[in-house]
Image (cartoon, coloured by chain):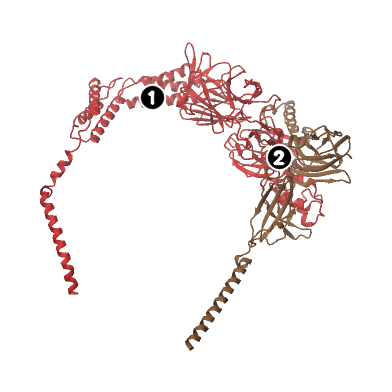
Amino acid sequence: MQLRIKKSLTYLLPALLLVVAGGLLLCLNRPTLWADPTILTVTVVSTHPAPDLSALTANIASAQSLYNSATEGTLPGQYPAPLKANLLSAILAASAINNSYTQSQVDAAALNLQTAMNTFSAGMIDLTPLHAAIVTAQNDLSHAVVGVAAGNYAQASVDTLSAAVVVAQGIVSAIAQSVILTATATLKTATAFFEGSVVLANNQILLAPSTSLTSATPEAVVTSGNTATSSIIVPLTVTNPTLDLSILVTQTATSSSATTPGDIVAHVTTPVGVAVMTIPGAAVITSSDILWDGTFNLLQNVSTSLVSTPSISGQPTSAVMAVEIGAGSTPLTLDTAVRIAMTGKAGYFAGFSYNGSVTPIETVCADDTQATNNLLPADGDCRITVGQDMVIWTKHFTKFVAYSVTTSSGGTTGSSGGGGGGGLLASIPPPYSPTAGSVILRGLAYASSTVTLMQDGQITARTLSDVTGAFEFTLSNITPGVYTYGVQAADSHNTRSTLRTVTVIVTPAAGTIISGVLLPPTISADKTQAKQGSAINFFGQSVPGAPLSLLIRSLLQHTVAKSLSANAATGEWQSLFLTDSSAPGAYTASIISLIGTSTPLSADLSFIIGNADVSKQNLPAAILALSPDGVVNLNDFSVLAYWYKRPLTAAGAKADLNHDGVIDLKDFSILAYYWSGN
Amino acid sequence: MKVSISATQKTVWDEVVPRFCEVPPLFIGLCVGILAVSFLSFAAPARAATLSFDPQDHTVGMATPFEVGLRLDAGASVNTVSITLVFPPNLTPVDVSDGNSIINFWVDKPTYSEANRTLTFSGIIPGGYTGTGGRLILLKLKASAPGSATLTADAGRSVIYLNTPDAVADTFIVRPFTLSVETGKENMPNQIPDNAPPEAFLPSLVRIPDELGKEQIAVVFATQDKGSGISQYEVRETPSDAWFADDQGWQVAQSPYVLRDQDLRSVIEVRATDKEGNARIETIATPYPIPWYATGTFDALLTLAVMLLAFAFVILKRRKRKLSKSIKQ
């Protein structure tokens, strides 16, 4: 062991000595490092470049000029006392910065001084906004007629606004600009309140952030208070939606104009699809007719048969959607662009029409933004495809049309249907067809409902409709041939609609678009039997805002009809049927939607007026016995097929849907009626 | 159908009727009348359904077959058809295609009776069909003698049901069609090739009680072929422990097909083949696979393992014996 330690020391000691010697040499060569560490700090600072003071210097000069030209005081154009002192302090602080500061410190000082100048300028007493508000209020007052007729105002409203104007006019100076701004806001609020107090006509409704027009109130009145974005829902039942800016109209010797106080977005459902128009805030709508009263049609549906579309390469064309915006023969122009989206019309030709003949819109928009399209020339238009929609940007109001080429035989080009279920459908390929072998199917169901698509009787896809009830399916890689598509929707109570079907031929050459699938309303009841004298509550869902007719038929085929409307937002409907005047017996209830060219009929709902109340069941007992889960599909078909032409025993009794003791085609027909797919 | 409101049928409503229906009796009548007309226009058949023939040519020869389609025009929605066609002595169907038929599910596949010279079929269209020119079947016919030949349907043995909850028969018209059969006339062959298999489908299992009420498990299936039409379906059941599926195991089947393996230990395949031989196979995975310890594979492996162990045991025994012998020596 001792020997080993000795051996180690023999190597370790010389190495240790070498390290100590090296360290001493290093210290001797760097005396300052040991002597005074502050010297090192000074050396580092002295190596930085001088900062660029030019921006700061310029700001100081501007601030100095501003300061020198400003007059302290409370009158318009003057600056309240503290502002000058504050600016002077900022100037002095900036002037203290020199080459000894870092660049970032110099930049921060320049920014601080700029901020101080902005604050100073904004603090100048300025009565301009208040005077503008006074002019607006006085304009309102000058046109106001006291009375109770539509468009009139109550005397109290006039007096209140007049008083507010007097108060505002009394302000000629202020200790701070914020006082002026507060007075301006107060007057604007009073003006908006006054405008909102106008006596509305029976068909008018005040525009709110979210407004649903109805067939009873198809006209929305805009006031200067509508500064936030206003959304207008126009259901299918409103055929004459109108926007009324008459309160905001100002007239000159040569024109009449109105300025939108905020963005206005209108969602309009027409029989041929949904159109959405966005009018930006501060858009000036002008008419050369000084008698224009500030009202105009808001995407009013125009019958496509009334629109004469131009031929393309010698081939005739026909309109698939036409909407009118404007004031009839009175031309209306805008200083900023308005966006009109025809949903689901991607790829169609676009045009506009003043007098019946359509002028094609050839220009393709550079993009789909407000800023870019504001650069359109006066009265200019352009079109652009956005997803499945055709979007038109325009600076004038008139009729806008989507159209496509038709064949000489009168049908539209490309694939066409071999027949339509319910006679409601058309297969219209646009000029730029969807992918060959693809099928696009669009229609209207209920607001936010689950819609199921069946292809040849078997479920292919499901989707969710939007708030207007619109839905769309896109199928691709379809083998060419004849297909029967069935569409069914479930309402908010999970009651399924009847199945709407269409049979089409899918060709290999072009895609197929099926549009206008209108699902019938659903109907349910809280009872299947009502004691005579009690009430049955019928309810269901339809396309939002649809006019409906509830039909009650007795076995003797006496029919009672009742008109009602579905809720404009949700499409839900309900009606209480009192049975005290009805004879005991079996009845059937159904509901028809009276929109579009077809009148889709709901399923028949049987009920009895008897001597006791019996709560509801959604499907007939025979169907539920066969299919307890209520899903009627191939499995149930197979049960019938098994018993078809066999002696019927008790085991197969559930397949006998009409209880006639035999499984025959009548049972298959009943099954086909209640079919819901897999 | 008469639509009116009688005094005894007057109904009390909870809501206010539309204004134009409110007061004058005349207006009430007008109101209800408008609604009734709109109701009737939908509920009643817009027009009777029509069965007609869509021939390839009005004049045909006898050397080769030619095609004639049977079409349905339906003014009101119909969901079930059962048709009996009648053939003249000089026309005989040699094939019937359901390709591109509007019928989605067949109750009776087209069947020809030489004795009666009739062809019958029936099927359903879930949700109903409304329109014109919907093809029901495509007939391939052969003419055997010159002269005129009239194709028609036997209205007395045919029925079409409206798409209603209570199986109401629709009225329909048959438009017979007369062909001229000429010697030497050449029939144009069908040039459209069918290379596509039948449409994808989803077979499923159902329990169906037999005549005695005992439940039996069956596989159900249906699909369409958009070209030549479905020729046949076949089902194959392959035990889940089988190493290979048997090509000879396909059984011609009709839906519903009662499974041989009622324990559902097999992979179930359904093959749909069109008339051009294009086939599509859909598979139902084994619902209750044979457990690993009960499969033939496991048995074979177990046997092999036992044999190996026995072999190893023998080898070791021999070595041990040899070692003992060498130590003794």
Q: Are marks 1 and 2 on the same chain?
A: no
In the rendered image, the residue lying farthest to the top is A253
Q: Looking at the rendering, in which quadrant would you find the N terminus of chain B?
A: top right
In the rendered image, the residue lying farthest to the front is B329
The chain letter corresponding to red is A
Q: Tell me if residue A550 comes above or below residue B122 in the rendering.
A: above
| Quadrant of res B317 | bottom right
Tint of chain B: brown
User: Mark 2 sits on what residue?
Assistant: B193
User: Mark 1 sits on what residue?
Assistant: A184
What kind of residue is marked 2?
Answer: Pro
Instruction: Please give left or right for residue A435 compared with residue A377 in the image.
Output: right
**SS state under label 2:** loop
Q: Nearer the viewer, residue A270 or A220?
A: A270
Marks 1 and 2, how far apart at CA: 80 Å
**SS state under label 1:** helix
Instruction: Please give left or right for residue A436 compared with residue B58 in the image.
Output: left
Q: In the image, what residue occupies the spot 51% across and 23% down?
A: A198
Instruction: Please give left or right for residue A214 compared with residue A368 in the image.
Output: right
CB within 8 Å, label 1 to label 2: no
What kind of residue is marked 1?
Answer: Thr
> Mark 2 — on which chain does it sit?
B
Q: Is residue A165 visible?
A: no
Q: Tell me if residue A221 comes above or below residue B286 in the rendering.
A: above
Q: Is residue A600 visible?
A: yes
